[in-house]
Amino acid sequence: MPAFKRVLLKLSGEWFSGVNEKGFDKSTFEKVVETVKDTSETQLAIVLGGGNIFRGKELNILNIDQVSADYIGMLSTIMNGIALSNFLQNQGCENSLFSSFAIGNFVKAYSAEEAKKSLNQRKTVLLVGGLGNPLFTTDSTASVRAVELNADIMLKATNVDGVFSKDPKINPSAEKYDTLSFDEAINKNLKVMDQTSLCFCRDSGLNVRVFDADKENALISAIKGNEIGTLVHN
């Protein structure tokens, strides 16, 4: 029996670009396929970021306001969703793509009921378009969708091996936490995810595991309930 019946996985857009500065890296898409096939007993929903296509700071030079920048970011996540959905389908992985707002006749608007139905049918659910509102991060999207879909845990794949007392890339002596309470993360202002998401997960009783997506078999290991990275809990 799998450790979790249903999992919400948050993947950053930057991760999809792999060794490239922007765009897509085939190896990251192949990792998702391998993960989906290896964890087929677990119902998996994935929230996608869009940083491999667009980063908000790029519009600063044009004085584009935050709201407009956020809408552009939402569209970037949808582009990632279309690409990943097609790639998964071509590799024999059934999936359903949902956006917070419908795009033409080829990306359906998100519905918790429809997403749950797809999960129960053993389809991977891809969630894009953020929450459909500006000024909210994809971490917020992941935490809200995880609660809506009754996920057993939220997994946040990053480029560092968990949560540290300081940035480990700048401070080699930074302490890594194996486990961490939400209150401690909030009070110490640790960069787990934004404070709104932390408070929401805490108040909803949703545990979060933060881990390095690039470690060997990390996605599979996290979904199977292995103790990697850092577990953030009440």
Image (cartoon, rainbow, N blue to C red):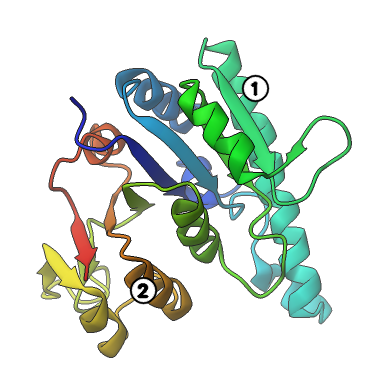
Which quarter of the image is occupied by the N terminus? top left
Pointer 1 or 2: first along the chain: 1
Residue under the image location 26 percent in, 55 percent down: 209
**Residue 179 falls in image quadrant:** bottom left
Q: Which residue matches tag 1? A: 86
Secondary element under disc 2, as helix, strand or loop, is helix
Name the residue furthest bottom.
187
Q: CA distance from mark 1 to mark 2?
A: 36 Å
**Residue 195 falls in image quadrant:** bottom left
Mark 1 closeness class: few <14, some 14–19, many ≥20 residues within 10 Å:
some
**Residue 208, percent from left and from top:** 30, 59
Secondary element under disc 1, as helix, strand or loop, is helix
- Mark 1 and mark 2 in contact? Answer it, CB < 8 Å: no
Establish if 19 lies above or below 59. above
Identify the amino acid type marked 1: Asn
Residue under the image location 67 percent in, 69 percent down: 56
**Residue 234, percent from left and from top:** 21, 71
Identify the amino acid type marked 2: Asp
**Residue 200 falls in image quadrant:** bottom left
Residue 180 placement, left or right of 40:
left
Residue under the image location 50 percent in, 20 percent down: 121
Q: Is residue 24 visible?
A: no
Residue under the image location 77 percent in, 75 percent down: 67
**Residue 49, percent from left and from top:** 56, 52
- Label for residue 203? 2
Residue 130 placement, left or right of 16:
right
Establish if 221 lies above or below 193. above
Establish if 167 lies above or below 109. below
